[in-house]
Amino acid sequence: MAKKIHIGSIIRQKVLDSPLSVEEFAAGLNLHRTSIYHIFKKETMDTERLKLISDVLGYDFISEIYQKQDAEQTPPVQTIFMTVEIDAKTLQKLNLPDEFLLLVKKRT
């Protein structure tokens, strides 16, 4: 299950990290400073407004959101290598695909 992302908090942090003041950020969006604080409280936002905010701050919020969601939904991959020795008769009994058997034979 994907974790909820509070977009307003992310925007707030990016504004704080930017060289813009809240007033300058508001001016870039053609909003009053108090409206910005309402944006900071929003859990969700329409993509058109988010795109405008991205343009003003020079940061791609949409990609960040999708990357975070993808990372949360993708289970970590663990690779295990092992060596197993089996004789030719046992190998044939395993009913492995022919392509795999050819690879095994090439490596031995």
Image (spheres, rainbow, N blue to C red):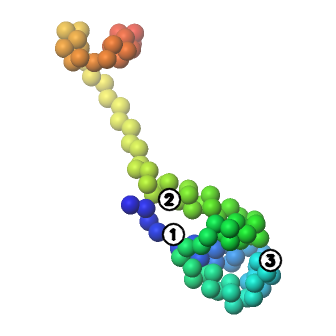
**Which residue, given by chain and number where applicable, does mark 2 sit on?**
69
Q: Are marks 2 and 3 in contact (CB under 8 Å)?
A: no
Q: Quarter-wise, where is residue 15 in the image?
A: bottom right
Q: Earlier in the sequence, mark 2 or mark 3?
A: 3
Q: Residue at x 57, y 83 (%)?
A: 41
Q: Is residue 38 left or right of residue 106?
A: right
Mark 2 residue element: helix
Quadrant of res 38: bottom right
Q: Amino acid at mark 1?
A: Ile
Kindly identify the residue that appears in the image at 55 percent across and 73 percent down: 44
Q: Which mark is residue 46?
A: none
Q: Which residue is mark 1?
A: 5
Quarter occupied by the C terminus: top left
> Circle 3 is placed at which residue position?
28
Q: Position of residue 69 (x, y in %)?
A: 50, 59
How far apart in space, not on screen, are marks 2 and 1 (Cα)?
Answer: 8 Å
From the top left corner, tell me how far across and down residue 17 is, in percent: 69, 74
State the residue at coordinates (38%, 60%): 1
Above-or-below relation of 44 to 69: below
Query: Does the residue at mark 2 contact the one at mark 1 (Cβ under 8 Å)?
Result: yes
Q: Is residue 88 left or right of residue 67?
A: left
Tag 1 or tag 2, which sits nearer the N-term?
1
Q: Vertical placement of 53 versus 22: above or below?
A: above
Q: CA distance from mark 2 to mark 3?
A: 28 Å
Q: Is disc 3 placed on a helix, strand or loop?
A: helix
